Image (spheres, grey):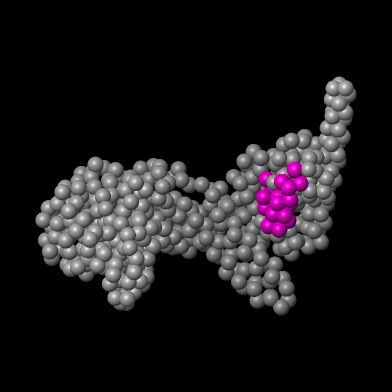
Amino acid sequence: MKRIAVIGSSGGNLYNLGGKDPDKLMGEIAAQCKGAGVEISGVQFIAASESMDTAKESTSAILYGWDPDENRLMKRTAGSLSEVNQAAAEIDHEMAGLIRAGQVDGLIVMSADSEVANRFTIEAAAELHIPVVGTGGTSMALISSKGANVIATSGTTGTTNRTRAVSFVTSLCKHWGIKYVPVLGSPGAGKLTAANKPWRRVNLKGIMQSSLPGFIAMAIVLALSQIPALKGLSEVFDVMLKALPVVLAVIAAKQISDMDEVSIVAGVIAGALSINGGIIGGILGGIGAGLLVQFLFVKCVQWKFPMTTVNIVAGGFAGLISGLIMYYLIAPFALQAGEFIKYLINEAISFNPIVAGVIGGLLIWPAILGGVYHAAILPIVLLEMEKTGNSFLGAIDMVGLVMVSAGITLANIVAPRDKGEAAVAAPGFLINMGFGTFVEAAYPFMFSNKWVFAGAILSAGVGGGLVGVFNVRGTAYVPSFMGPLLSNNVIGFTLSMAVALLLAFAVTLVANKAARVRKQAQGDVSAQQSA
């Protein structure tokens, strides 16, 4: 197994690009080393409280070493920068000794001081001709001038902790002839590597769920714009409407490549060029950008491009290529696909809104229990919200799931089957009413009593029918008192919500009372038998 040492400091420009967070910086390097089967023998890292470009001798700083047992940084000393530099000299001698003893096969350098704090380590590396990789234009130039075997160097501009770590380990492994696949997921994610087929990481459900705050923000702006004094917000709504594909593209790109700022930039570029394709266009553009980010990044590192250039190519070109394909080829078809789905929904509703509402309400609980809700219903809700800021199915979500769950939990607070159930039900009721989510709070009561389960479906069906009667468009995931304000029919939505809650509450009360009567009867029988 090859072994490396890491030396350096939080640097000048590096300080603003990850150097001020030593744990995260070294965590990325450790993740890549683990993926390559490389061991970290030692670390000497000086972290100042400000950029080295402006730091003084009195600036506070911390000297870090390496804990091989915990595989993480450990603090060696803290004090002024002057004091920490003096303490760093001891580790410098230790590191040089490890290199001369053959315990270090490669050196990673980040904004190191080859004249004082890291002098002996650099001299030892030059003597044994071990490969050196690193960042920091001035420091790396000085290290090269001392005869060190620098095999890869780069500035820090445009880089991130992850991209630098991948570049370091890729260069070293290529020099040693070791097969290495960059770990492109979060540190500790394990199997999320470039070796996996990246399209397997495409998760439409995850993209939709993560983008939900953007849709809710848009719905809030739409509701506020209905107030006469805030009519000007209608222009803000139009801007946010155009931004939704960008939001989805960024989420999709980051989900697939997970390359921090690089994937975000690629997603923004692709999303901006995918606006004409609606939210489906944004998703497709972001997926394409994410796939290209990973491919271009790995290729550029293998071709030994400077790290800044690697990031420019991976982030800029990936977003541009995917975005242009969407803009000229796919966006019109993506837009039509979304419009067709909305057309089918509107046709079904206009044919008979009451029947559509009843069917939607009756099926909403089986859908969420069967895992269909997040995979199919939520995307349709967001497609509906893309144009109007609210949704027919979104209203059924609030009425049939959130309010029914609130009614069931409220009944178990007022008259539970067992005393302990009130404590379980209370948080669920408060979250449903206060935040418009956590319908799962009703599960324990539904699964333990078939009448409560049937009552939930019945209440959702009745509530859905009322949504159809009043032709309501709304949304869940907001506080219950805000739900009607974000709908197209405040009174109709309020009545639909209230009826669903009260019906679920009443059915659950009756079911709980029947359960208590049966339990008491069984207790009396048991007592008589004992007597």
* 477 lies above or below 376: below
Residue 239 location in percent, x, y? Answer: 57, 69
Q: Is residue 360 inside the magenta stretch?
A: no
Query: Is residue 502 something one can see in this rendering?
Result: yes
Residue 230 location in percent, x, y? Answer: 69, 76
Q: How many marks?
A: 0
Residue 214 lies left or right of residue 478; in this view the side is left
Residue 10 lies left or right of residue 217; in this view the side is left
Q: Quadrant of the C terminus?
A: top right
Q: In this view, which residue lies farthest toward the front?
A: 531
Residue at the image point whose x is 38% and y is 45% from the top: 193
* 197 lies above or below 317: above
Residue 389 lies left or right of residue 108; in this view the side is right
* 272 lies above or below 507: below
Residue at the image point whose x is 20% and y is 44% from the top: 177
Image: magenta residue range? 420-440
Q: Is 457 or 230 nearer to us in this picture?
A: 457
Main secondary structure of the magenta stretch: helix
Residue at the image point whose x is 27% and y is 46% from the top: 38
Residue at the image point whose x is 76% and y is 57% from the top: 472
Residue 155 location in percent, x, y? Answer: 27, 65
Q: Is 310 or 237 nearer to us in this picture?
A: 310
Residue 97 location in percent, x, y? Answer: 17, 53
